[in-house]
Amino acid sequence: FGGVAVLGAFVALIIFLPSVGNQPFTPPAPTSSMPSTMPSHLPSARPSSSSMPSMFPSVDPSENPSRFPSVSPSSNQEFQQNALIQMSSVFAIENWTNNDGWESISNNMCSLYGIVCKVYGVDIFVTELNLAANNLAGDIDEFTLLGNLKHLEKLDLDSNLIVGNLTEFSLSLIQFSNLKYVDLRLNELT
């Protein structure tokens, strides 16, 4: 019966969804500051019939770096800065052996001690966290914004005082398609 319910739901979607997104283009009504007709040398504003909107658009612009400017260039940086701010809080920045730059993360995240960045087009991404033997102390399970660093290639937190569930944390690392190196040795992970 489960297959019938799924098939019924799918058929219902096919019946109700064809009209979504297929509405004819209606230009805005002209105002006094806007010409009533488009000049002939400009391309038509009518969308092409072959362009279909994506059913699952990416909400996070850092998921798909491109060589073209992002709609909101600061949003990638803000996602990453939030992760780094949370990290400094969770792992007690005031006790770190070296916390150069971490007091003012919003100025330039790529100048922080232990951070390596790469540029893709106009967007900057954190690709390495190298904070081995730096007296980080805290529960890794509370570092919930790590996923904001989607382009992470290297995570080195070796020889610190980090506690938490290693299995759970390891499962969260699956989302990082670029991650090539992880070192969590000599911590207090269970």
Image (cartoon, helix red, strand yellow):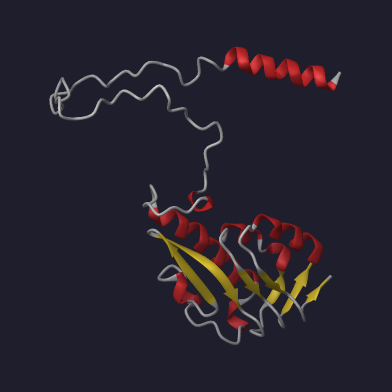
Quarter where residue 89 is shown: bottom right
| Residue 56 in the image: above or below residue 18 | below
| Residue 32 in the image: above or below residue 69 | above
Residue at x 56%, y 35% (from the top left corner): 56
Q: Nearer the viewer, residue 139 or 118?
A: 118
Return the x and y of residue 151 as percentages of the image width and height: 56, 61
Q: Residue furthest right?
A: 1
Q: Nearer the viewer, residue 97 or 39?
A: 39
Return the x and y of residue 181 as percentages of the image width and height: 67, 71
Return the x and y of residue 110 as percentages of the image width and height: 46, 72
Quadrant location of the N terminus?
A: top right
Q: Residue furthest bottom?
A: 97
Residue at x 43%, y 67% (from the top left corner): 106
| Residue 174 in the image: above or below residue 32 | below
Quadrant location of the C terminus?
A: bottom right
Can residue 92 be seen by looking at this rendering?
Answer: yes
Q: Nearer the viewer, residue 65 or 71?
A: 65
Residue at x 63%, y 84% (from the top left corner): 134
Residue at x 66%, y 64% (from the top left corner): 143
Quarter where residue 144 is shown: bottom right
Q: Nearer the viewer, residue 130 or 144?
A: 130
Return the x and y of residue 69 as percentages of the image width and height: 36, 52
